[in-house]
Image (cartoon, rainbow, N blue to C red):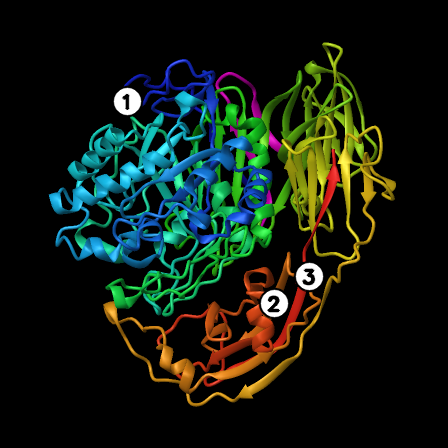
Amino acid sequence: MTHHSLRVPTPAGPPLTGHLPFTDAPGVADPIDVTSRWFTRGGRPWFPVSGEFHYSRYPAREWEEELLKMKAAGVTAVASYLIWIHHEETEGRIRFDGDRDLRRFAELCARHGLDFIPRIGPWSHAEVRNGGLPDWLLARTDAPRTDDPAYLEPVRGWFAAVAGQLKGLDRAHGGPIVAIQIENELYDQPHHLLTLKLMAQEAGLSAPLWTSTAWGGVQLPPDELLPLYGGYTETFWTEWDGGWPDTCRKHFFFTHQRDDEGIGADLRPTHVRGGEPAPTDRFPWATCELGGGMAVAYHRRPGVDAADIGALGLTKIGCGSVWQGYYMFHGGTNPAGEFTTLQESHATGYPNDLPVLTYDFQAPLGEYGQYRPSYDELRLQHLLLADFGERIAPMESVLPERQPAGQGDRETLRWAVRGDGDSGLLFVNNHQPHEPLPDHPDTSFTVRFPDGPELTLPSAPVTVPQGAYFCWPLRLDVAGLRLDWATAQPVCTVDVGGRTVLVLAATDGIPVELALDIGTLRYVHTPMGQVVSADGRFLVTGLRPGTDALVEVGTVDGGQVGLLVLDAATARTAYRGVAWGAERLILCGDADGIVFDEPAGEVRVHSSAAQTSFAVLPAPDRAPGENVGVAADGVFTRYTLPTSDDRGSGILGVSLVRAAGPAPGTVTGVLDRASAPADKDFEDVAAEYLIDVPDDLPRAGTLLRIHWTGDVARAYVGDTLVADQFFAGRVWDIGLDRLPDEALRAAGGLRVRVLPFGADAPVYLPVPVPAGEAGIARVEWVTVRTQVITV
């Protein structure tokens, strides 16, 4: 048996307050403030969740639905780069129209109760041309990103234009802007960062928080900018043959190191990597770039799994994060440039060649709004933060005395506790990419609290399975019930007839056990398993997780509490939102996702299934709509929607127009890395296919799913490039509603060109590709329907 122990220290004294020059607007109802250890809002601890979504990389007509998807995932703040070159490609013609309508995007955030965080640059990076600086600006100055007057003058104009768009959307006017980021990844010019902050304020921009990225040994002007950190599961910016970077590996351990010196390291001189970090005793641990996925460069095309993203996110909470910020949370597409393409490339002196158009990022919500499994993994954690973040934020992260010996140690169990002296959460991570971690059989824990009893859990040792990551509650108060521990992860609470029900998620392979403090209850009723008394607790064991695994408890104050344990798969379908006049828990089951549109009084279900059902707790007084099937599903009520008339899926015809020629030879660019093939290669040696797209296919919500092999593929309507992809073993999705209808019909279909993969190409791929192969195996179409349920 392997027994792990840890002592939670006596809580530290109160954090520093009032030591930073961050103030909210006078008179706001929920003032935002910063202590040295956590954030507050309305005088209470606040645990934000932010997600990056670039409005200028997504069609404006779809912004609102995508923002609602992010909100349904538990994102509370939307961050977005304001990419200067997208707005002012031609000097003096600043565009805020159409997909560039910054003000409308911010107003949509406000309409749906989402905070907004503009990352105003001027330099953004964002894998965009010149890092977002317009070409005309670089022609004017030899010293960009400095206090060179020739640089600052146009920056002042950019900030003024941004301030004009955001006028009246600050906190003083009831707006959504809670933070503003200055610049990005500028590591050695604190004076310039302060200059930019003062210029932005002079332009009229205001927010309670002013932030800066803080990785890579950054030098910040003291106390002027809140340092924000990051951590990625993979990288596209490292060498093709360098293996999995140690800077990524470390994020799957519980540590108190905030910095990641690897992010953007290809753009920094070696001597500044791993420099002195920003002070940790004055600022809370906040993040803005936890990897929601990863882009691909031509020379390095990593794959990211949902479990990678979920494990990294949960581990950061266990490490002590008090702000979960994801980059990207939503993918997109580069706009077409007026003069040039707008991607990062060797042609502009950057170390990486990115695809011309796609910026999907393997994000939880894809380039066309596709739901990915990582969306469910993160939503599960965000539901926890929505209900318990106020308690978690002040909790100190405590590491066990026995820790892994180094980043190569795959045998020592990785775990930590966040505690406040009386209660807490126990975190375990037994997952990392590329290098699987072993099972840990016969595992138990002892956690000693200074203000409470010693807990040894579970009552019988368990096996922590390979790939598992979870957190367990310790001495958690639930409406008067003391839950000493549960071998299941808290998800959220829901009110059912005046009774608080705590929903928990089981972990596959670990038996569920609930330990209830006898002193806080009158009775326990369980639908299955058994209840035994031991050491001042009732132990509930033998539960079979599911929609009927509801343990009912009466508390000593006369109240009632429910403990509902869902199996791991079902828990990942859970949403919580206001519907039918109350907050409810909805299991979407066979649907792709659900959004709650409170201003419109609607719940909308997105589904590619022929028939869609969802389960609700508590059930509304009547069925939501006509011809809706109703059935019991454990303690839930399940509703089945009428079958849609839209065609759901099928196979499209593909014709080979031209076979591929020999693979083009490798060309290298910056840092001697392989460069993407030239346009001429697609004309001369690419295989060409014509995909028949029937006129009667529904345009809205339909994805063309292309299964292919090769090196690089491009899709055209006529002569217009409409989509592209570097091969990395994934299906290539193209949104049918992004393709111009008339031109598509006139062209007789979608034309796809695929270049063969060269032998011994210096390119990292997560899957093998036979050299010289260039082909399309199959093209599917899938329609994701949006079904409206009026509430």
Q: Marks 1 and 2: in contact by CB < 8 Å?
A: no
Which residue is at 44% across, 27% downward? Answer: 175
Residue 357, percent across and down?
Answer: 43, 63
Q: Please tell me whether mark 3 or mark 1 is closer to you in this view.
A: 3
Task: Give the distance between the C-alpha atoms of the residues marked 3 and 2, in whole angstroms.
Answer: 15 Å
Q: Earlier in the sequence, mark 3 or mark 1?
A: 1
Task: Please tell me whether mark 3 sits on a helix, a strand or a loop.
Answer: loop
In the image, which residues are magenta? 440-457
Q: Earlier in the sequence, mark 2 or mark 1?
A: 1
- Estimate the x, y position of residue 69 in percent, counting from the top left: 59, 43
Is 449 covered by the magenta stretch?
Answer: yes
Quarter of the image with the N terminus is top right
Q: Secondary structure at mark 1?
A: loop
Q: Is residue 198 above or below residue 569?
A: above
Q: Is residue 246 visible?
A: yes
In x, y percent, where is residue 178? Answer: 41, 29
What residue would you read off at disc 2?
A: 705
156 or 343, nearer to the observer: 156
Question: Which residue type carries mark 2?
Answer: Arg
Q: Answer few, some or many: residues within 10 Å of disc 1's Cα (few below 14, many 20 plus, some between 14 and 19).
A: some
* Residue at image mark 1: 20
Sequence-wise, the earlier of marks 3 and 2 is 3
Distance, label 3 to label 1, CA atoms, is 54 Å
The circle drawn on residue 698 is: 3
